[in-house]
Amino acid sequence: MTITIGKPCAISEKGYKVHNEDFIFPLPETVNTNQRLFLVCDGVGGAEKGEIASSLACDLFQAYFSTFLEGEPTPDFITKALRYTEAHFDGYIVEHPEATGMATTLTMLYIGSSGVTLAHIGDSRIYQFRGGEIIYRTEDHSLVNSLFKSGKINSEEMRRHPQKNVILRAIQGSDHPVKADVALIRDVEPGDYFFMCTDGMMENFTDEALSSVFKRQLPPDIMKDVMMESCNGKTRDNFSFYIIPIQNVQESAGIKQNILSFFYSFI
């Protein structure tokens, strides 16, 4: 399978916060249609530690990929990239004790020859849109999502819950090895969009509101501006996202496209 993408669009803004603890890879000004790896991270920890955690995670993850990836990023390979990142978190904290307690979410998207590989930790999200409809969305590793799944709160209470920012998984270091959820999406068609975002976007966008933007079939750069306008001056949290348009999908000779998505969960 050969997947061709259009020009991706992205932003990363601090909202009403003093510091931007989100970090994305690649930076918007450097991305091109040959890009295969995308990362969006939301740091936590306060006192600037969150922005260190998110930028370190992006730098270390992409360094591991560029150095060691051969073929497709399997769940085992992604596990090793996480352990590599956690070990370097340990080293940074030893040299900078003030960074103790820093952590970050992570979303990863890789466009390969078998499909699109996704991985996520925490409450930053990845969506797949087709015709404006959500056909895939990651499941938040958060307290409110856990409460919702157990039937203790409803969807509206999730949005207003005082602990809605509490996450249950994050990259922290070797003392707290994290589990990522990984999916290989083989059902990819021209005109699809993948959308990666931090939770700050959810202050102004429900799933339905996001769908309405993608249903308008605007060029990606215009969609970016629409989302930016809806968040700018209204979002208390940092907000970051990547819009990745799928331009063309060509099947390898003799291989029929598998319409299933394969999900992995590992330690």
Image: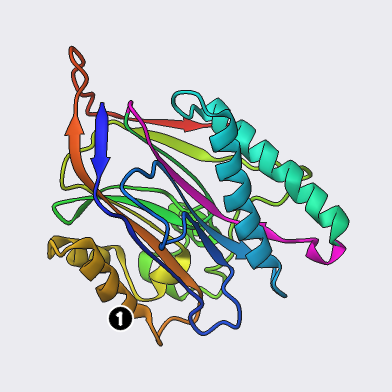
Percent x, y of residue 183 = 41, 35
> Circle 1 sits on which residue?
229
Type of amino acid under label 1: Glu
Answer whether residue 170 is visible to the viewer in this image: no
Answer whether residue 35 is visible to the viewer in this image: yes
Q: Nearer the viewer, residue 28 or 213?
A: 28
Relative to residue 126, is residue 202 depicted above or below? below
Say left or right for 255 vs 162.
left
Q: How many numbered discs sit on the rendered protein? A: 1
Quadrant where the C terminus sits is top right
Say what secondary structure mark 1 lies in.
Answer: helix
Relative to residue 197, is residue 222 depicted above or below? below
Quadrant where the N terminus sits is top left
**Is residue 72 within the magenta segment?**
no
Say left or right for 76 vs 47.
left
The colour scheme is rainbow
Name the residue located 64 percent from the left edge and 43 percent from the top edge: 178
Percent x, y of residue 147 = 50, 58
Percent x, y of residue 213 = 20, 67
Name the residue located 29 percent from the left edge and 68 percent from the top edge: 224
Relative to residue 76, is residue 98 depicted above or below? below
Percent x, y of residue 199 = 46, 65
Q: Nearer the viewer, residue 134 or 192?
A: 192
Relative to residue 102, is residue 64 depicted above or below? above
Name the residue located 16 percent from the left edge and 42 percent from the top edge: 190
Magenta residue span: 97-114
Q: Residue 10 is drawn in which quadrant?
A: bottom left
Name the residue located 16 percent from the left edge and 47 percent from the top edge: 191
Q: Nearer the viewer, residue 8 or 169?
A: 8
